[in-house]
Amino acid sequence: MSYQFDFAALLPYWPEFVRGLWLTLQLSAMATVLGFIVGTLCAIGRADGPPAVKWAVAAYVEVIRNTPLLVQIFLVYFGIATLGIRIGANTAAVAALVVNVGAYTCEIVRAGLESVHKAQLEAADCLGLSRVQTYWHVVLRPAVERVYPALTSQYVLLMLASSITSQISAEELTAVANRVQSDTFRSFETYIVVGLLYLLLSFVVRIAFWLVGLGVFVRRRKLGTAL
Amino acid sequence: MQSFGLAHVEFLAWAALWTVGLSAIAFVGGGLLGFAVALLRVSSNPAARVAAIVYIQIVQGTPLLILLFLIYFGVAVIGFTGVPAILAAGAGLTIYASGFLAEIWRGCIQSVPKTQWEAAECLALTRWQRMTRVILPQALRIATPPTVGFLVQIVKNTSLASVVGFVELAQAGKLINNSIFEPFTIFVTVAVFYFALCFPLSTWSRSLERTLNVSRR
Amino acid sequence: MSAVANPTRAAREDTPRSSQAGAPVVRLHDVHKSFGALKVLDGVSLDVGPGEIAAIIGQSGSGKSTALRCINALETIQQGTIHVCGHAIHDPGLDRRALRRDVGIVFQSYNLFPHLTAEQNIMLAPTCVKGMTKAQARDLARAVLSHVGLAEKAEHYPEQLSGGQQQRVAIARSLAMRPKLMLFDEVTSALDPQLTGEVLKVMENLAREGMTMILVTHEMAFARKVASKVVYMHRGRVWETGTGAMLDDPQTPELRAFIGNGL
């Protein structure tokens, strides 16, 4: 093997990498928050909505889970353009990621909702809580607490999958890498560096979720139960 | 300019066959490699366990897109040029699948109750015999639904092989779009193809899971 | 103890008498309830007056738990009328929220909310339903917790408490709503004998303070000692009613057999 590694050639590009890293984090964070809201609403609709809503949510989840994110990104990007609305690649990227992760969140949260025992609902009803109050205090929190590890894994996957938005030229980390490697001809080195950056990011995201979990799920913290 | 027609659908159908082929390579390759990693992960040797954990963490912590680029450019670095796209894509997806399948199967192996290990040990079976005769047959049943479920992920992720120039469904869609630019129609059709491949697998996985849950009760 | 045979006390009373003065808190009249083809309540009539402690006993499947659940509108009935604290339970237009303010219920499986501490479990309904401030609700929670002897467990989560303690928290949670009527659905059935005692003691204290209570129970000794009215249900009917003394002098072969098996 006669290849000479040359990581020094990448050094001048470090501000680019930082900018890409930052955008990847921003895209993922926005998609996570919005996707969680969309997914949770869908899960509630799926569990307790009128038949039409149940059916629509089921169809949405099936379509998203059985088609590749890459194709979904193209469809959102070109689809919005077809409607005559001009949005940037980054906005389209977030929109596509939200549509995608919303479906997965829906399935995960639904499993959590189903794990809440009927007797809990009855107890809340007998204490005089309204349906909305019951959902908020008695169903949603324990449900999300139970599926929090699964949600964490899903959102780490989402962060990694945000790399695919480079295909519509969202300027995140992978797109930066693609540009840098074509500038420097140091492709292998570039992707090694970016691969390591993603590894780092995935650990950072995991730690962030762990910290959020500690803050939100007080019982887990107090009882020392693993999340 | 030509518009989207039957010829394009036919082209996509051929590309879908490549998607299936690539998925099969990734599943078989990833399955073999992943099984080995899973065994290392539950082995009694701490060094083997650590190695397996590191491998799984790296594969699961890196985007598949980056894995594909690394292999595509990596083989060139080692000195092979002009490696066929199917080999680069197959290798990338194999590594990706092995990292996830290893973790899925580790969970299944460890979900076989400890008492089964003890019972097998009391019958004086060797560690290998315990694994192959007692634990794996039970783990296999538990492993089937999530494995079929992961097959869906593999099929969907072959779409990323387009970045190393492999012409499968997604890349075929892009090629057609480059010539006639009807993105919405084209990618909806592409999505329909993927759905047709994945939905039966999803449904199968779910029904396997239901059967398993029923028999466990 | 006088055990004079009283023929009017015998089975299938169609016109139940209230044993105390004043309008009954609970009045069931000819209540019928089926689950599909299965007839669970077959013409149940029952009055419980203010301050009364009614113990419903009977084999499993006799309809006693269903009767209790019907009183709290957890089941809908097919025929008959139920009045509870002035609410017409059989009326489809029943104001459930208003009913919930008057009636508390305690379940066999406690049904505490696992993600909330004992105190938070108790505070939830007063803040949500009665609009209390957190501070008011916390004071109330501390008060009812010490009432059931668990003041020091306020910060504990359900899984940190024993079954008996969880059940006492569940009782406190209901008491915090200041109900006029308390229902107990086999509240000690899931407990070890030594934990049963602490829960029964709390209930006995409540009885002494004049709370109107209906309990479905397997604890014959407790029924005999505390209940002002014992109701024996069999095959979805009120088979025999009387005071605690009834258990020493069963009138029907069914009750005799039940007591023979149970004691």
Image: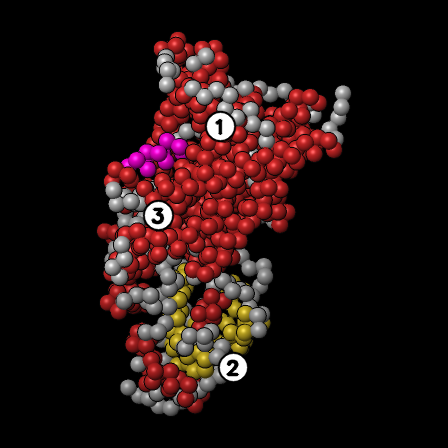
Is residue B110 toward the left or the right of residue A82 in the image? left
Question: According to the image, label 3 marks what residue?
Answer: C116
Asked whether disc 2 touches disc 1, contact meaning CB atoms under 8 Å apart, the reply is no
Up/down of A227 relative to B93, above or below: below
Is residue B5 toward the left or the right of residue B23 in the image? right
Q: Choose the circle earlier in sequence order: 3 or 2.
A: 2
Quote the CA–CA distance across marks 3 and 2: 46 Å
Residue A77 image position (x, y, % from top left): 60, 25
Type of amino acid at the residue the image marks with label 2: Asp
Q: Quadrant of residue A223?
A: top left
Majority secondary structure of magenta residues = helix
Q: How would you rate the neighbour count of disc 1 (Cα within 10 Å): few for under 14, some for 14-19, many for 20 or more?
A: many
Up/down of A4 relative to C3, above or below: above
Give the residue drawn at x 68%, y 31%.
B11
Label number found at residue B88: 1
Given the image, what chain letter belongs to the residue carrying mark 3?
C
Whether residue B130 is visible, yes or no, is yes
Given the image, what chain letter belongs to the residue carrying mark 1?
B
Asked whether disc 3 touches disc 1, contact meaning CB atoms under 8 Å apart, the reply is no
Residue C91 image position (x, y, % from top left): 58, 63
Is residue A189 toward the left or the right of residue B168 in the image? left
In front of the other: label 2 or label 1? Answer: 1
> Is residue B82 covered in magenta?
no
Under circle 3, the secondary element is loop
Is residue A170 toward the left or the right of residue B126 in the image? right
Type of amino acid at the residue the image marks with label 1: Ala
Magenta span covers which residues? B50-60
Label number found at residue C14: 2
Asked whether disc 3 touches disc 2, contact meaning CB atoms under 8 Å apart, the reply is no
Residue C162 image position (x, y, % from top left): 27, 58
Under circle 2, the secondary element is loop
Q: Quadrant of residue B141?
A: bottom left
